[in-house]
Image (cartoon, grey):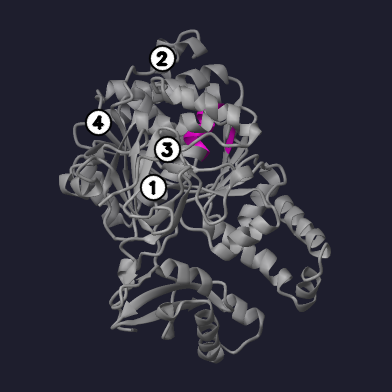
Amino acid sequence: MLRTPFITSKPFGCPKYSSIFAHYLQMCAMIKENFIKLYEQSFVEHWNMPALTDYGENNTLTYGQIAEKIARIHLLYSYCKIRRGDKIALIGKNTSNWCISYLASVTYGSIIVPILQDFNPNDIHHIINHSEAVFLFTSDNIWETLEEDKMLGIRTVFSLNDFRVLHQRDGETVQKYVKTLDEEFAAKYPQGFRKEDIKYTDLSNDKVMLINYTSGTTGFSKGVMLTGNNLAGNVTYGLKTQLLTDKSRVLSFLPLAHAYGCTFDFLTSLAAGSHTTLLGKIPSPKILLKAFEEIKPTLIFTVPLVIEKIYRKQILPVITKRTMKYALSIPLLDVQIYAQVRKKLVDSMGGHFSQVIIGGAALNPEVEDFFYKIKFPFSVGYGMTECAPLISYTFSDEFVPGSCGRILPGMKVRVDSDDPENKPGEIQVIGENVMVGYYKNEEATKDAFTPDGWLRTGDLGTVTPDGTISIRGRSKSMILTSSGQNIYPEEIESKLNNLPFVMESLVIEKEGRLIALVYPDYEAVDNMEADHNSLNIIMEENRKELNKSLAAYENISEIKLFPTEFEKTPKKSIKRYLYMNLSII
């Protein structure tokens, strides 16, 4: 039984942000700004300002140029008689054309269906068919892996490389029209395309504008239906709290088809008048640090995997040296060393950012503790695709270690526990950002909500009276022992991942025993010139060391080496369901 009262967030105590939040709370009591009109206004206001740049290609587009490209697609949609509610599928890497296709579809009144490019062709075919998409925008290399006869409702396929027609259904004349689009555009706008020509559809915020297909750790892909109000709730939060302004520079390296990267690197950025550079490459530490140096972003949105890799590769080797450990044990000297480490880390990430916002998965506690100790400006937020995505967040000035911020204004949270501050229970939310349901899946929608209308997050955690949330793990991964003890494998894994030569791990239960699967850090093994055959001995030492930090009922019985990296979702969470019944165990 749920015993907790409705809990809402309060304005931050920090003077710097209290007035901003007071204003934002007032805004929450008013009608939410129309999502589509946010971009109509932004394109006019920031007409000549830089908006989007494709990294390494030197082709910056202004807000006016983006508006003109959107107008050309609107002409095409009009010719093709695209109707309100028609679905437009979109798949490809982060590029300016990806962003233009997205906004052109939404501002016309159609529903955008972004698809993660990590999905395999069969999943892509399924999503396109399930969503009933009529148009598809895709990069050329992805199109080569797809089969047009397996996408039954698609009328036309457009290239994200240059918007040419890759395929059209028999009887369609889209390709012919595209060849005359320049003439049609000139005829419609004889004086050239101007600010006053920007007039987007009048569509109320309660209409579904986005269907976002998830790829979670449970293995089921569902189409999350998000309204203009869900999207505006997140975007206006970013605007009113001044996370992003028309002075901001953003480096977009998270996949835009995922809710986190899309909402802040792209949607909030363009609504604020910011300048976004789209990386369009796999964000390895080497590529990312080079891009940080060149772009010098003013705010960084990232996931734990990226930050943890930087910590392991750049910081951990330095602070674990014997001489450094000794120096850090000396009062005052440790403060100076930590300040130098912080400066080096900040400089390596461009040196101009106000804070790093981490979301998408849990941050390793050891990494979090170290960053907090050296006063690195970071914060951890919490959300899910079903909330478009933000549920809670706190500015770095007031971030509480171990938490993931305070519940947002316009949202409420409760915990399924008789002691919500100390005893974990399922976190449930209701409010502005919560989806309307899953597309064509009434059963999943019913299961996602409580009888009284609260969204079940599936996450276990606690919450303080001021709305600060702390996550313990996923309810579906929690292990219940025969003695009634709750074990959160994610907490054990975070400790194991910091031990020598462990790249990543997965803790599972087998016949009453806890077993850890470990994919070793072979690069570190080679750098230390260690023998691969000795890994079993090293892992046994790791097991003993790990168990010293665990309760007796959490002790790991055995560590088994795993031959490959674990398969992950696009936000880099391990797909746990794939490893529950392996023969290796």
Q: Tell me the SS state at disc 4.
A: loop
Which residue occupies the foreground of this view, 464 or 197? 464
Above or below for 189 versus 314: above
**Left or right: 166 in relation to 563:** left
Rounded to the nearest whole Å, what is the CA distance between mark 1 and mark 3?
18 Å
Rounded to the nearest whole Å, what is the CA distance between mark 3 and mark 4?
37 Å
Residue 470, x across and y down, in percent: 46, 54
| Chain-order first, disc 2 or disc 3 | 3
- Mark 1: give few (<14), some (14-19) or many (20+) Cα within 10 Å: some
Q: Are marks 2 and 3 in contact (CB under 8 Å)?
A: no
> Which residue in the structure is indicated by mark 2?
199
Classified by dominant secondary structure, the portion drawn in magenta counts as helix
Q: Which residue is found at the position 29% from the left and 21% from the top? A: 79
Which stretch is magenta?
Answer: 265-276
Identify the amino acid type marked 3: Thr
Q: Tell me the SS state at disc 2.
A: loop
Identify the amino acid type marked 1: Met
| Chain-order first, disc 3 or disc 4 | 3
Q: Nearer the viewer, mark 2 or mark 3?
A: 3
> Which residue in the structure is indicated by mark 4?
86
